[in-house]
Image: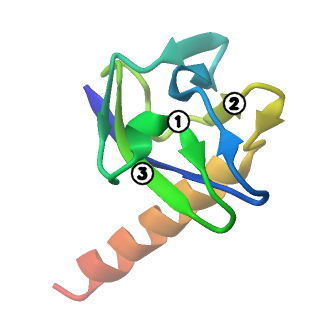
Amino acid sequence: LQPFLVGYTGFEKEISFDPTRLEIRSEGATHYSRFIVPVSPGFDRHVVDLYQTVYAIYLFPAEVDLTATLEFRYGDMTSGSSWRGVVDRVQRAKTRLDGGR
């Protein structure tokens, strides 16, 4: 399984969320979490207060390719192509580390 640390932040007072609505889209496929492991106390309430963030580890199928373009979706909100920037930063950091050996 492929783990992701996911956080929900409240930008208004007492915002509810449904953790099962998060999905990853990649190369024509939609992936849903297999397991959700709460990290923060109160995550199971499915409510966040103003400026509060709660976290959980989401376990997605192993076939999610971390080097592909991933789009994280929750309802009508989307990450767009920002995942590509994450992959690029990780690859640059690995190159710097490999160059230091």
Q: Residues within 10 Å of mark 1 (few under 14, many from 20)?
A: some
Frontmost residue, 101 versus 4: 4
The residue singled out by tag 2 in the image is 74
> What's the distance in space between the residues labelled 1 and 3, CA to CA?
11 Å
Work out how far the residue at label 2 is from the one at label 1, CA to CA, in angstroms.
Answer: 14 Å
Residue picked out by circle 1: 46
The image quarter containing residue 74 is top right
Check disc 3 and give the amino acid type: Tyr
Rendered position, 28 above or below 66: above
Q: Is residue 54 left or right of residue 52?
A: left
Above or below, comparing residue 31 to residue 64 in the picture = above
Q: Position of residue 62 (x, y in %)?
A: 30, 22
Question: Which color mode does the image show?
Answer: rainbow
Judged left or right of residue 51, residue 86 is: left
Who is closer to the viewer here, 34 or 27?
34
Which numbered mark, 3 or 2, is in the foreground of this view?
3
- Distance, label 3 to label 2, CA atoms, is 15 Å
N-term mark: 3 or 2: 3
Q: Residue at x 25, y 75 (%)?
A: 98
Q: Which residue is under mark 3?
A: 55
Determine whether the residue tagged by mark 1 lies in a helix, strand or loop: loop
Q: Quadrant of the C terminus?
A: bottom left
Q: Nearer the viewer, mark 2 or mark 1?
A: 1
Query: Is there a contact, CB below 8 Å, between mark 2 and mark 1?
Result: no
Q: Indicate the amino acid at tag 1.
A: His
24 or 101: nearer the viewer: 24
